[in-house]
């Protein structure tokens, strides 16, 4: 039986829909991520710090209000009664954050008691909750939890982040949360966590990418996920079809267990491809490389037969910490990956921090941008903070002494940016040599991520400044179509098969071929066998993807005739409608 069960009712199976972002089936007890389990810092303020602290509190309230509005919108897709109920609740939460007893009380405490905002919120919440509880009014008593929840939300916003302790979960747990950041997801250990589902998040955001990389089934953007579910409730996460089943019936459980076993067998079968070459039926070789999110992905990359690392996202070095990794630490991490790949090339991308991949040390240093994806991220941040970028470049040059390493620059928009980084590399190399530190010799090739439409359209000019191109279709799609890749509300509009995106890919590939520089695709479409024929048909011969996707893409390549794929790509590039493009591609995949 499927129904929306009211909280506290006897368990009945409930199926919820979301975005299946990482395939696989997880079955296990739910662990609900509490928004509030944080240790609140307490400290005294100097008189001249008080105004800034009041402002910091106001910013945190603004952030909390934005989160609540987002949750309210999300609930609109639920059945009317549930949506109305959540709407009323969220309105009450919003009211508590807008010139309310809470906000006035906190501000007064910061000013009169000279304490930090987190401590002031905690103290004020305790007093309000106590007053409500003491009034003997059942309605107000029931609001105590709401007051606490709002308080926790503001504290979390003040502290910006909270490092999750997923390592302590028993094996087979399914995590349910309002939202998991990429940094939270980095802490997930697949030996403990069978899968996860969240209320917020889109299919191409970094949380989704991280889930695919870990091979952990995940469904994001699930409205109503946390309503009426408790710790320990049995849950199924179906990452293939984008379903979450709360309290499945025995029949449903048996069916999902059967499907899980089938998928495991399929994965075993694919392993037999490891030592076979990625070559088309008409004898064209394709290079298949791995995208690494975290050093631990290295084992998966080697296991799946990756011919190198096409994209090492170095953001992991900056996650879940408040300080910065120094040159030696970064060098150690990079060297281990270069040596681990045993002579196969490693493409290390300079940090793409900013945007949704905020690092703790940025807190307070930069104001939170209204449009993070368009703000101070990636190479822009590196050029604004040259010391930071130089430290990483030095670590890369040193790691390059231990095996082939290429340097990749994210979010490049202009030739001038590439030239500036090249000059930095030359200066850093000079300094290191003077100190007698061994570095890559010759200096590593410097590549450009083509992921901004402006870069794709200037691919001709960039091809003279760059030693190689890596096309980042995740951002390229986001920026070309103006669709936030991490927002589940516009996920249905996110379409890498849109003719505009394909033309930008084609333009970039042609510029690279003319300049005779290597070009790869390292966005998520590279790991989807559905897109392989089109990418090869457009002239791509290097793909970099989540390690676990390599065998599937290899199987597709080995079954394909490149001449036929090229012909089909030509037909596709004449189309103006992405639905037609998808149909032509699916038809080709079904027959060739
Ligand atoms: C991309 O944008 O396609 C890409 C590979 O980079 P990231 O997903 O890290 O932004
Ligand atoms: Mg990108």
Image (spheres, rainbow, N blue to C red):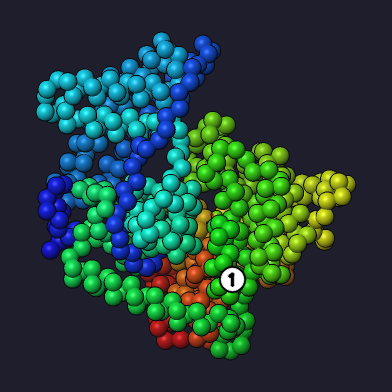
Residue at 39%, 79% in the rendered image: 265
Is residue 146 positioned above or below 438 on the image?
A: above
User: Image check: 293 left or right of 37?
Assistant: right
User: Image check: 158 left or right of 292?
Assistant: left
Q: In which quarter of the image is residue 509?
A: bottom right
Is residue 366 positioned above or below 100 on the image?
A: below
Q: Nearer the viewer, residue 42 or 111?
A: 42
**Residue 430: image x %, image y %?**
85, 48
Q: Which of 428 and 272 is in front in this view?
A: 272
* Residue 120 shows up from this direction: yes
Judged from the image, the secondary structure of the residue bearing numbered disc 1 is: helix
**Residue 322: image x %, image y %?**
56, 37
**Would you say the beta carbon of the disc 1 residue lies within 8 angstroms of ligand 1?**
no
Residue at 24%, 73% in the rendered image: 255
* Residue 538 shows up from this direction: no
Is residue 504 positioned above or below 351 on the image?
A: below
Residue at 49%, 52% in the rendered image: 186
Residue farthest along the bottom direction in this orientation:
282
**Residue 167: image x %, image y %?**
44, 52
Q: Which of 337 and 469 is in front in this view?
A: 337
Quadrant occupied by the N terminus: bottom left
User: Image check: 446 left or right of 92?
Assistant: right
Which residue lies under the disc numbered 1?
302
Query: If the picture is divided into quarters, which one holds ligand 2?
Result: bottom right
Q: In which quarter of the image is residue 97?
A: top left
**Residue 157: image x %, image y %?**
41, 33
Badge 1 crowding class, 10 Å Cα cut-off, few under 14, some 14 to 19, many 20 or more, is some
Residue at 55%, 79% in the rendered image: 274
Image mark count? 1
């Amino acid at each position: 039986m499927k129904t929306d069960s009211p909280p506290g009712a006897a368990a009945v199976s409930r199926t919820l829909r979301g975005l299946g972002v990482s395939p696989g089936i997880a079955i296990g007890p739910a662990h609900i991520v509490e928004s509030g389990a944080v240790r609140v810092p307490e400290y005294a303020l100097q008189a001249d710090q008080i105004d800034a602290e009041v402002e910091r509190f106001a910013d945190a309230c603004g952030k909390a209000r934005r989160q609540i509005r987002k949750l309210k919108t999300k609930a609109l897709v639920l059945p009317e009664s549930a949506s109305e109920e959540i709407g009323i609740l969220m309105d009450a939460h919003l009211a508590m954050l807008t010139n309310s007893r809470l906000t006035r009380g906190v501000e007064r405490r910061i000013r009169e008691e000279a304490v930090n905002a987190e401590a002031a919120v905690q103290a004020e919440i305790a007093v309000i909750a106590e007053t409500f509880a003491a009034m003997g009014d059942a309605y107000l008593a029931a609001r105590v939890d709401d007051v606490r929840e709002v308080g926790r939300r503001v504290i979390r916003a003040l502290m910006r982040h909270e490092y999750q302790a997923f390592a302590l979960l028993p094996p087979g747990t399914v995590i349910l949360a309002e939202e998991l950041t990429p940094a939270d997801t980095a802490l997930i250990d697949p030996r403990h966590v069978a899968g996860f589902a969240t209320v917020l998040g889109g299919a191409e955001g970094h949380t989704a990418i991280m889930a695919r990389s870990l091979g952990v089934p995940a469904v994001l953007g699930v409205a109503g996920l946390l309503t009426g579910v408790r710790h320990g409730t049995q849950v199924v996460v179906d990452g293939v079809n984008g379903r979450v089943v709360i309290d499945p019936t025995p029949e449903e459980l048996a069916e999902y267990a059967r499907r899980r076993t089938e998928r495991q067998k399929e994965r075993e079968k694919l392993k037999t491809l490891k030592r076979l070459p990625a070559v088309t039926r008409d004898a064209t070789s394709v290079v298949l490389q791995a995208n690494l999110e975290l050093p631990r992905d290295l084992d998966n990359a080697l296991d799946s037969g990756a011919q190198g690392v096409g994209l090492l996202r170095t953001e992991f070095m900056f996650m879940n910490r408040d300080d910065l990794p120094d040159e030696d630490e970064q060098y150690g991490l990079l060297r281990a990956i270069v040596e681990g790949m045993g002579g196969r090339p490693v493409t290390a991308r300079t940090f793409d921090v900013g945007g949704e991949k905020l690092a703790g040390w940025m807190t307070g240093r930069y104001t939170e941008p209204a449009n993070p994806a368009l703000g101070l991220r990636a190479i822009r941040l590196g050029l604004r903070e040259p010391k930071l970028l130089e430290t990483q470049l030095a670590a890369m040059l040193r790691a390059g002494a231990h095996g082939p390493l290429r340097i990749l620059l994210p979010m490049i928009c202009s030739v001038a940016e590439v030239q500036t980084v090249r000059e930095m590399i030359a200066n850093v190399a000079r300094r290191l040599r003077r100190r007698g530190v061994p570095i890559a010799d010759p200096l590593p090739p410097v590549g450009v991520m083509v992921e901004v439409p402006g870069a794709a359209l200037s691919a001709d000019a960039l091809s003279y400044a760059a030693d190689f191109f890596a096309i980042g279709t995740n951002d390229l799609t986001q920026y070309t179509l103006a669709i936030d890749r991490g927002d589940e509300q516009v996920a249905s509009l996110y379409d890498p098969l849109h003719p505009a995106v394909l033309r930008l890919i084609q333009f970039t590939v042609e510029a690279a071929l003319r300049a005779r520089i290597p070009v790869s695709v390292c966005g998520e479409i590279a790991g989807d066998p559905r897109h392989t024929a089109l990418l090869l048909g457009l002239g791509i011969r290097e793909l970099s993807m989540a390690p676990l996707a390599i065998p599937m893409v290899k199987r597709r390549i080995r079954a394909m005739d490149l001449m036929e794929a090229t012909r089909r790509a030509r037909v596709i590039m004449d189309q103006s409608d992405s639905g037609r493009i998808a149909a032509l591609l699916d038809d080709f995949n079904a027959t060739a």
